[in-house]
Image (cartoon, helix red, strand yellow):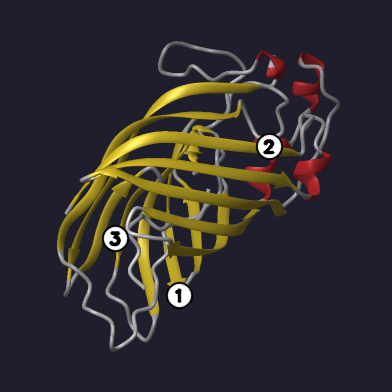
């Protein structure tokens, strides 16, 4: 089945995090021998929209901001697919026996206790005294088979969470008619001690400076997610896109004193123009 929309799983991270809508890595569908060959060359979508999300995972507060939407890809029969989008940059190698493998450079938006400037409009005063978790780059690998995908990424540098995260997801899409396409997906995230301590732990020093009690968060599955997306062709190459992700905190993330809301929804509504 040919899909007319971008495929990607992942954890719905926050803020522009949200567009993380927008929090599992790109998935590649297996192609049977009697299906047409994958189109080569440039393709993608450019647009703008509005995203509404929690100020951080576990927060009772929300923010709504305007965001650009960019998805670009170049596909080569011999080299695979190079793509740049909301989840960063990736090189997906040519499919072998139904499997796809690739490398990824993504970004984690971090978490901020207050608004710093126009470039960081999404702090939360509830976190006063907790200090910031700086944004950071993440490098990793992608593996896909049919509708299933796995993304494993390590934070780079020492300014961010410094941890290792793994996102697994399953997504299924269907073309309803020549104008409307839809998809649904589920996923989960595992994180190591460094990631969990950064985002869900509270040190003794932070407990003295904030409203929270000291808490140690250990590695494990910290969230599960369900998502739904609809894309409607308005005219020509212009589309309306809507996506909703619901994330549920689990384990030590759910039990953290900073997690007042264990479940939160993130929504995106926008208009895009496709090209190929």
Q: Nearer the viewer, mark 3 or mark 2?
A: 2
Residue 146: which numbered mark, if any? 1
Q: Residue at x 52, y 52 (%)?
A: 10
Q: Nearer the viewer, residue 30 or 258?
A: 30
- Gap between marks 3 and 1, in whole Å? 18 Å
Query: Sequence-wise, which precedes: disc 3 or disc 2?
Result: 3
Residue 161, position as x, y percentages in the image: 57, 39
Q: Is residue 52 in view from this perspective?
A: yes
- Gap between marks 3 and 2, in whole Å? 31 Å
For label 3, the residue is: 91
Residue 67: which numbered mark, if any? none
Residue 22, position as x, y percentages in the image: 49, 44
Q: Nearer the viewer, mark 3 or mark 1?
A: 1
Q: Residue at x 82, y 23 (%)?
A: 212
Residue 246, position as x, y percentages in the image: 64, 44
In the rendered view, does 159 fall on the left or right side of 264?
left
Q: Residue at x 30, y 39 (%)?
A: 272
- Rendered position, 52 above or below 154: above
Q: Secondary structure at mark 1?
A: loop
Res. 97 image quadrant: bottom left
């Amino acid at each position: 089945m040919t899909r007319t929309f971008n495929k990607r799983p992942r954890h719905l991270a926050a803020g522009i995090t949200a567009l993380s809508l927008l929090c599992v890595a790109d998935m590649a569908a297996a192609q049977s021998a009697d299906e047409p060959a994958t189109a080569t060359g440039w393709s993608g979508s450019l647009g703008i929209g509005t995203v509404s999300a929690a100020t951080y995972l576990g927060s009772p507060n929300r923010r709504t901001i305007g965001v650009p939407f960019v998805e670009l890809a170049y596909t080569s029969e011999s080299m695979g697919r190079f793509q740049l989008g909301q989840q960063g940059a990736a090189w997906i190698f040519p499919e072998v026996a139904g499997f796809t493998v690739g490398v990824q450079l993504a970004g984690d938006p971090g978490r901020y206790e207050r608004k710093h400037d126009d470039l960081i409009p999404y702090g939360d005063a509830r976190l006063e005294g907790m200090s910031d978790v700086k944004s950071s780059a993440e490098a990793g690998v992608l593996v896909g088979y049919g509708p299933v995908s796995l993304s494993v990424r390590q934070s780079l540098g020492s300014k961010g969470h410094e941890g290792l995260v793994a996102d697994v997801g399953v997504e299924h899409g269907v073309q309803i008619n020549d104008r409307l396409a839809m998809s649904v997906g589920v996923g989960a995230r595992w994180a190591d001690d460094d990631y969990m301590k950064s985002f869900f732990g509270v040190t003794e020093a932070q407990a003295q400076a904030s409203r929270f009690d000291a808490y140690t968060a250990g590695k494990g599955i910290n969230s599960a997610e369900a998502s739904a997306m609809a894309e409607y062709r308005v005219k020509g190459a212009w589309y309306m896109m809507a996506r909703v992700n619901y994330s549920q905190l689990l384990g030590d993330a759910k039990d953290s004193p900073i997690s007042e809301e264990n479940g939160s929804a993130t929504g995106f509504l926008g208009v895009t123009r496709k090209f190929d």
